[in-house]
Amino acid sequence: MIFVTLGNQNFSFKRLIKSIDSLVKTEIIKEEVIVQCGYTTYDSDSLELISFMDKDSFMESIGKARFIISHAGTGSIISCLKKNKKVIVASRRKIYGEHIDDHQLEIAKTFENKNLIIGLKEDFSDLPEKILSLNTIKLDKFVSNNNNFNNDLIELIDSI
């Protein structure tokens, strides 16, 4: 199963769903695809579309997925990386009305430069290639910095 998450922002990301639906219809993707689509509306006979999921269902879907295709939301990406999943990331763009600015380009590039995710071109034309070569793509393991941050914060508070 492939899990796709578009986040919960009040913007459509139909551009990505159309690309994925096309890959299912041309049989480049031959397995079940579950899409957490948020506010994106789209009709498809080949995708299972779920607007919103509670946290447990969301994490369960990540856990069951062979890999994830995600928007470039930090929370979504980190949730997938913590489950040791390969994540193909598509950035929402302001020019298409998918977000208020292009910060998702910066987020995706940061994770990609750390070799933690598989980034896509703006037009998603490389999505088929990335899916087909997924098993040969080697990524680094995500290491959370939360413990260090929390310890530093506690130390700072204690020093006041």
Image (cartoon, helix red, strand yellow):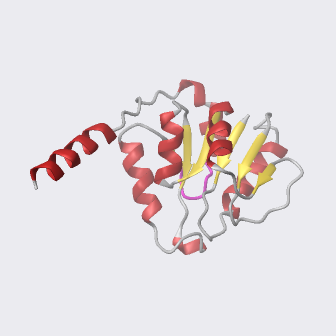
Nearest the viewer among 27 and 8 is 8
Residue stretch rendered in magenta on the structure: 120-125
Residue 147 x, y percent position in the rendering: 30, 37
Q: Quadrant of residue 57?
A: top right
In this figure, what is the number of numbered marks?
A: 0
Instruction: Determine whether, in the image, residue 12 is placed left or right of residue 92.
Output: right
Residue visible at 54% across and 58% down in the picture? 122
Instruction: Determine whether, in the image, residue 113 is placed left or right of residue 69.
Output: left
Residue 20 x, y percent position in the rendering: 73, 49
The image quadrant where one finds the N terminus is top right
Q: Give the farthest residue toward the right.
A: 45
Instruction: Determine whether, in the image, residue 27 is placed left or right of residue 104.
Output: right
Residue visible at 14% across and 49% down in the picture? 158
Vertical placement of residue 21 versus 32, above or below = below
Q: Quadrant of residue 111?
A: top left
Instruction: Determine whether, in the image, residue 140 is placed left or right of residue 76.
Output: left
Q: Can residue 145 be seen in the rendering of this structure?
A: no
Vertical placement of residue 142 versus 36, above or below = above
Residue visible at 21% across and 46% down in the picture? 154
Residue 65 x, y percent position in the rendering: 67, 33
Q: Is residue 61 magenta?
A: no
Nearest the viewer among 131 and 62 is 62
